[in-house]
């Protein structure tokens, strides 16, 4: 029965891969109705996609919104997390409670709450959405930070730097930050990937007023299944690239830690 776990894994992998494979094939197909494989192949779908100015505008808005939220989170939240982890570790349970709250609230409940709380206040809903995005990436940043700091006596390093005449900011910038930058970069990549794939919040909070790649995909699904499949393929390639980069960084970091 040693073959059973491997067989189950192969079957599960094939089952999960079928929708992805079907989407990729359909994006290159001319017609696909009465055969196992497409009846013809074409690159015109991707040509139409890449010459569409609205696609590039939607992609740019997505990168701007997700990337900007991640940058704000890294600038504002990372120093606060590091300060708590180094000087007030007993308060980490409140961070973990915050993380649990991020996971506990479904996107639709959060969106309705944001609309009820801020609609009509004069604050742009895009700004509210960005703030929600910043909070939603805290779990990724925190976990990456904790994994990087495992086995790292950050408090002793900070104290040693201060004894040598450095301020807390200098010790953080020149001692701690270089040691945790790889983990933070991994957290930033994972956070960006999660925000690019988020749909519920942006659909309910801003909708078509700020058309991102998610909204562009939703619009094209009713117009052309081939074009929608091509958008999904481009999205998957980008996410796989980001995830692969994060995995390689984590692997290299683990190898350095083992040495």
Image (tube, grey):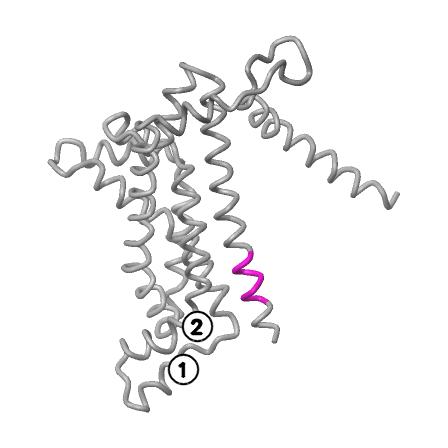
Q: Residues within 10 Å of mark 1 (few under 14, many from 20)?
A: some
User: What kind of element bears circle 1?
Assistant: helix
Tell me the mark number nearer the camera, choosing from 2 and 1.
2
User: What residue sits right under mark 1 in the picture?
Assistant: 157
The answer to whether residue 167 is left or right of residue 26 is left
Residue 251 within the segment the image draws in magenta: yes
Q: Nearer the viewer, residue 63 or 97?
A: 63
Give the residue drawn at x 18%, y 32%.
119
Residue 242 screen position, x and y as percent: 48, 48
User: What residue sits right under mark 2 in the picture?
Assistant: 179
Q: Nearer the viewer, residue 250 or 128?
A: 250
Q: Nearer the viewer, residue 88 or 192?
A: 192
Please state the extent of the stretch shown in magenta in the rendering.
Answer: 248-254
Q: Quadrant of the C terminus?
A: bottom right
Residue 99 within the segment the image draws in magenta: no
Q: Residue furthest top?
A: 34
């Amino acid at each position: 029965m040693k073959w059973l776990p491997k067989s189950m894994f192969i079957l599960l992998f094939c089952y999960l891969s079928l929708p992805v494979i079907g989407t990729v094939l359909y994006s290159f197909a001319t017609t696909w109705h009465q055969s196992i494989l497409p009846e013809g192949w074409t690159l015109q779908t991707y040509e139409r996609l890449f010459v569409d100015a609205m696609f590039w505008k939607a992609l740019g808005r997505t990168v701007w919104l997700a990337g900007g939220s991640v940058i704000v989170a890294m600038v504002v939240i990372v120093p606060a997390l590091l300060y708590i982890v180094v000087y007030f570790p007993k308060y980490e349970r409140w961070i973990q409670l915050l993380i649990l709250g991020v996971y506990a609230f479904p996107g639709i409940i959060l969106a309705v709450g944001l609309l009820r709380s801020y609609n009509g206040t004069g604050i742009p809903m895009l700004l509210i959405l960005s703030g929600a995005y910043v909070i939603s990436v805290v779990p990724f940043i925190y976990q990456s930070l904790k994994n990087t700091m495992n086995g790292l006596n950050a408090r002793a390093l900070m104290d040693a730097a201060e004894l040598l005449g450095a301020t807390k900011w200098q010790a953080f910038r020149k001692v701690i930050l270089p040691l945790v930058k790889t983990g933070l970069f991994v957290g930033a990549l994972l956070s960006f990937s999660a925000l690019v794939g988020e749909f519920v919040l942006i659909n309910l909070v801003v909708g078509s007023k700020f058309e991102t790649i998610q909204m562009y995909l939703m619009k094209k699904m009713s117009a052309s299944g081939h074009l929608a499949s091509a958008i999904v393929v481009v999205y998957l390639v980008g996410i796989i690239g980001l995830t692969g980069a994060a995995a390689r960084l984590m692997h290299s970091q683990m190898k350095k830690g083992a040495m």
